[in-house]
Amino acid sequence: MEYQTFFLVLSCLFPFIVYAFTISNRRNSRLPPGPKGFPIIGNVFEFGDKPHQSLAILSKRYGPLMSLKLGSRTTIVISSPDISKEFFHTHDLSFLNRSAPKAIQVGDFHKYSIVWMEAGDQWRKLRRMTNEYLFCVQQLDASEFLRRVKVQELVNHVNQCCREEKALNIGECAFTTSLNILSNFMFSMDLAQYDPKSTQEFQDLVLQVMQAGAKPGLPDLFPILQSLDPLELIWPENVYAKKMVNIFDKIINERLKTRSTTVSDGVSTEKNDVLDLLLNQKSNITQNDMRHLFLTLFVAGTDTTSSTLEWAMAELMRNPEKMKKARLEVDKVMQNNTNGVIQESDISQLTYLQAVIKETLRLHPPAPFLIPREAIHDVVVQGFIVPKNSQILCNVWAMGRDPNIWSDPEMFMPERFLDVKVDYRGQDFKLIPFGAGRRMCPGLNLANRMLHIILGSLIHKLDWTVVGNKRPQDIDMGEKFGITLQKAEPLIAIPMKL
């Protein structure tokens, strides 16, 4: 947040804010404990630039169920598996709605996006369609070949860089691969090539859309500003989402034109991709539904996957003995593989690689607060009142680094998952990077396949050195907060054939 802008608006609208604060800031004495905030602004400064870290520190003092005031908005912060289970299992129906930031609401994206819309009939319809037509096991199995092709293209690109001793931006490469896997799954086409300019444009759009929901803007803190909006504070982020929607509109319109032409010619050219499947269900889904569904899936599916892969590679490079162990396992499984690329059927045999992914998701969850929920009505949790319309933040980053849950929580130790059956499919609440309950990530099964085959391919018969003759231990592991948790410094490395 721009604090200079904040104070400018605050001084101009001081009388209105005082009135709104007086009406709305009567904290219920039964709220969970939390730090006492400043008048009017509440705990905004304690939120900070890296709120997942600052709120983790505060939870050590006030407990794993904590309340804050962000401007006039009550925010409840969860930082333990037991309380997470109470919210997202016991009381899941009471917290089904999402807390959509005002920047998302400007273009009415919260009304059409499966991520942000209220949990009503439309949400249930779209959720059912994603389960039946996009991410069911049969559909994923049927589309495995295209993922294998896209991963082979990544391997070819890495091998070319090996020959040229050329450094790679691992996050960008992972993003390109994830983007093309999704675009071929959805549209039977690539949306990027393995060059920075080709990938950067779409990646920038995704990151900007992610930023729109990352931190509270002024209208989120003080709703009175939404109607006044003197500085158009929430407009810029919205432009990027509209650009992406226009891309998908163009693809849909071109497909409709092709389908109408082939029908008149009596020749079918259906590609049997997701777009065709949805167009065949046109009585149940509109074009507006489709374009917003694609917006959601591409934003959620590309950035989270590529970011997790970048963190995994950074951790493995910083821990050469664990890189070697993971590589040997992949190489052993690949001895009997004649295709040259890891197949999804191999994942079950790659137990150490699975542990690497779990450990990466523990330390670097894609969404450190998940997607904020909202209380539909007053709910009693642990003897405290969670008031209606309050925002719910589940600090999975803090849970992943809690010494009461994990031994040596700051260390990268995939071995911790070899002897315990902990999964991230929403049942083990100490590891819920994809969420839990009815609103957990619908694309988890696809993400699970992509993470393992891409990471395994990046380490199969390959070693990596840090650019600039740096020691692996010196890789910058700083974080950049958003809805997703990015590396502050991109991971640039040179691949070497073994």
Image (cartoon, rainbow, N blue to C red):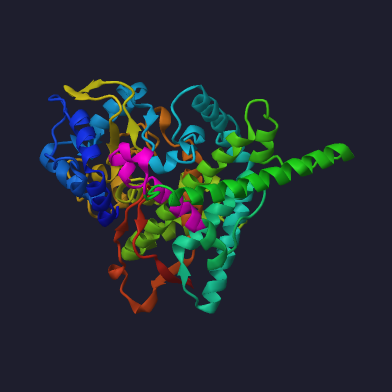
Q: Bounds of the magenta span?
A: 203-230
**Residue 246 sits above or below residue 371 on the image:** below
Q: Is residue 357 magenta?
A: no
Residue drawn at 14 percent across, 36 percent down: 34
**Residue 226 sits above or below residue 155 on the image:** above
Residue that protrudes farthest toward the right in the picture: 265
Q: Is residue 452 visible?
A: no
Residue drawn at 22 percent across, 30 percent down: 24
Q: State the residue in front, 312 or 74.
A: 74
| Residue 197 sits in quarter | bottom right
Q: Position of residue 314 (x, y in %)?
A: 36, 62
Q: Position of residue 445 (x, y in %)?
A: 49, 39
The overriding secondary structure of the stretch rendered in magenta is helix
Residue 191 in the figure: left or right of residue 317:
right
Q: Is residue 217 magenta?
A: yes
| Residue 79 sits in quarter | top left
Total residue callouts: 0
**Residue 197 sits above or below residue 207 on the image:** below
